[in-house]
Image: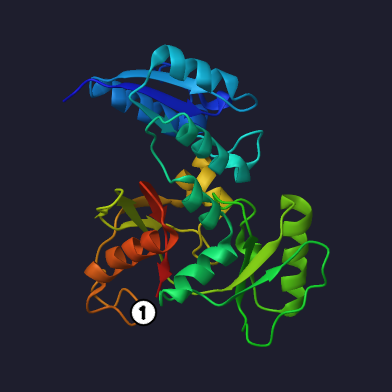
Amino acid sequence: MRRLRVLVLMHPDFVPPDSTDGYTARQINEWKTEYDVVSTLRAAGHDVRPLGAQEEIKPVREEIESFKPHVVFTLLEQFHNEPTYDQHVASYLELMQIPYTGCNPRGLILARGKDLSKTLVHHRRIAVPAFAVFPMRRKVKRPARLALPLIVKSLNEDGSRGISQASVVDTDEKLAERVAFVHERIGTAAIAEQYIEGRELYVGVLGNNRLRVLPVWELKFGTMGGQAIATEKVKHDPGYQERVGIVDGPAKNLGAGGTRSHSANSETHLPNTGARWIRAHRLSPLCRRHPVFH
């Protein structure tokens, strides 16, 4: 394998140490992704340089000019602590004419708004839950076509930010309360989607022109009570994950009544849907989507 110079961009708070020795599980969880990427690339024989960037773009340019990386591995999901700025990092790397991992700027912009994203794939005849958007400082009125129960999320944030058991609502009063929570605590518009009870399945897709669909992955909720949804605690609280038995791994029994209306061929239906979603958004070269099915 050719030895490459790889510049890994990340948040300054998550620049990992060279070793996990002496750190607690909770401390490691803060920068585990960054550590795994850097250590794995180094183990593969590449020359890897981590760089924390958040407030200034100048250090990125300086590293590109001095280190001359063959590729930039970007783990930056925000800039100026603003998630919607992630597409501008990709745009800057495009202008610098340096190869990089992750979605292109166009794909990031389209995927950032859940309403636009769902509208695009619906146009391509990919099934998505019914939804309604509730802008900031507007009265909450549920459209008659949108039946309860619903799950309420931030329109733009990801990583399950602001999602808890209270996000699933079954009355108009609870809907108004949760929309207000998103407006006030998250600071974004809210989206309420048809709540579909089922499994949490993830489909990873790699590639530019020719897509490679990875095996379907599943998040299992152990003994967690309430609705089986990927809340903020489920994704980001190691103590909670261990306490209730949150685990992930290859999805099994997808063809045995595993998915709504596609149980007979779901082994191929899910990967195909993931690839169609990527093409509908013009995403490249790496992406993950997680549809939830009956």
Q: Residue at x 40, y 52 (%)?
A: 288
Q: Nearer the viewer, residue 124 or 219?
A: 124
Q: Is residue 187 left or right of residue 168?
A: right
Q: Which image quadrant for residue 174? A: bottom right
Q: Nearer the viewer, residue 86 or 209?
A: 209
Which residue is tagged 1? 260
Residue 159 location in percent, x, y?
Answer: 54, 49
Q: Which image quadrant for residue 102? A: top left
Q: Residue at x 66, y 33 (%)?
A: 80
**Position of the N terminus by quadrant:** top left
Note whether residue 156 is visible.
Answer: yes
Q: Residue at x 53, y 71 (%)?
A: 119
- Looking at the picture, the colour scheme in use is rainbow
Disc 1 residue crowd, few under 14, some 14–19, many 20+, Cα 10 Å: few
Q: Is residue 245 left or right of residue 181?
A: left
Residue 68 location in percent, x, y?
Answer: 38, 17
Note whether residue 197 is visible.
Answer: no
**Position of the C terminus by quadrant:** bottom left
Residue 31 location in percent, x, y?
Answer: 48, 29
Q: Is residue 216 left or right of residue 140?
A: left
Above or below: residue 171 compared with residue 119: below
Q: Nearer the viewer, residue 235 or 50?
A: 50
Local SS, label 1 = loop
Q: Amino acid at mark 1?
A: Arg
